[in-house]
Amino acid sequence: MLQQTRVAQGTSYYLSFEKHFPTIFDLANASEEKVLKLWQGLGYYSRARNLHFTAKHIVNNLNGEFPNTYKELVKLKGVGDYTASAIASISFNEQQAVVDGNVYRVLARYYGVDLPINSTEGIKYFKKLATEVMHTSNIRDYNQGIMEFGALQCSPKKPNCNTCPLSSSCVALEKNLVSTLPIKLKKTKIKKRNFNYLVVVDAVGNTMLQQRKGKGIWQNLYEFPLLEDEVNETNIKELYAKVLPKVEVKSFTLYNKDAIVHKLSHQHLYTHFWILHTNAILEDGIAFSELKKYPVPVLIADYIKTL
DNA sequence: AAACCGGGGTA
DNA sequence: TACCCAGGTTT
């Protein structure tokens, strides 16, 4: 749950999961829709699907017994090197060094390592370095300590070098490289997409949602029928049929003139909502008051709130 | 190796 | 605006 997510952001979700799923059996027996609903707003939804998959795997194939070694943990879907190391060391006292974003920063600065932390070579190098320098006498406290040190003392911006107990032997501080380390390879270019959501209102005031399938963002979450084209007041009358072939629409109303820009880490979504009134009665219509039961992206949840 | 996958906080 | 977050999986 905390992968690429601040503790402060994830805490309320953790408490919610703990309450709804007190045991791994409760999680395994839940529907994916319920798991995604409770995850709504946290992002990186594959984590929720992987968590759910792994809960079912442990219940059905591992006799409900949680793996207790790094080697077995890292086989679980959604569990990589960091998570396996964290669980193995903190929960089971196994000698495994964790390397999260904090540890990369502390090690890169203290030892003056300029290998990119997101390169294949860098990942391998830092794991080896972390393993060599770890304190084995109390691995669980050491691992949590170095992560906390990175979060509070050796922070990404404006680290507290003037009060740092390691300042006398920190290579980055000596060479004036604190602000340049760690080095990270450039991220990929952000793509722009045009989203046009069709909010149907039928004769009895119901609307409809569709579930996102296949690859791409927001897998298995719900949204209004989507047109990903350049849509305007004129061509909407033809284009809508691409997603709503069976619905006869009597009026098209653009809800927001200026695009709502929803920013993901790798995509910017320029979004328009269209209200489509129809005299028909939708077969799979949903009352607007029922929309809150469905797991939806923040973009959709924010729109529903404004209604 | 590079791309993909969210949302929010911070300087 | 740019960067980062108790990363992992897929292409």
Image: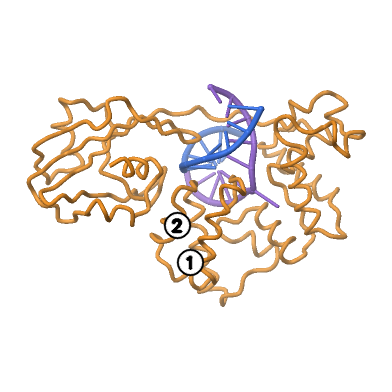
Chain colours: A orange, B blue, C purple
Give the quadrant of residue A107: top right
Q: Quadrant of the C terminus of chain A?
A: top left
Residue that numbered label 1 is attached to? A20
Chain for disc number 2: A
* Picture residue at 43% right of the left edge, 29% below the top: A191
Position of residue A27 in the picture relative to residue A199 (left or right): right
Identify which residue, A64 or A141, lies in the foreground.
A141
Pick the front one: A141 or A268: A141
Instruction: Identify the residue under disc 2.
Output: A38
The answer to which image quadrant residue A123 occupies is: top right
- Determine contact: label 1, label 2, CB under 8 Å: yes
Residue type at the position of mark 1:
His
Disc 2 secondary structure class: helix
Mark 1 chain: A
Label 1 element class: helix
What distance separates the C-alpha of mark 1 from that of mark 2?
Answer: 9 Å
Give the percent coordinates (x, y) of residue A279. 7, 45
Which residue type carries mark 2? Leu
Q: Is residue A123 above or below residue A221?
A: above
Q: Tell me what residue is drawn at x 27 percent, y 40 percent.
A: A226
Query: Which is nearer the eye, A110 or A78?
Result: A110
Coordinates of residue A138 in the picture (x, y in percent): 84, 60
Residue A203 percent across, percent down from the top left: 10, 49
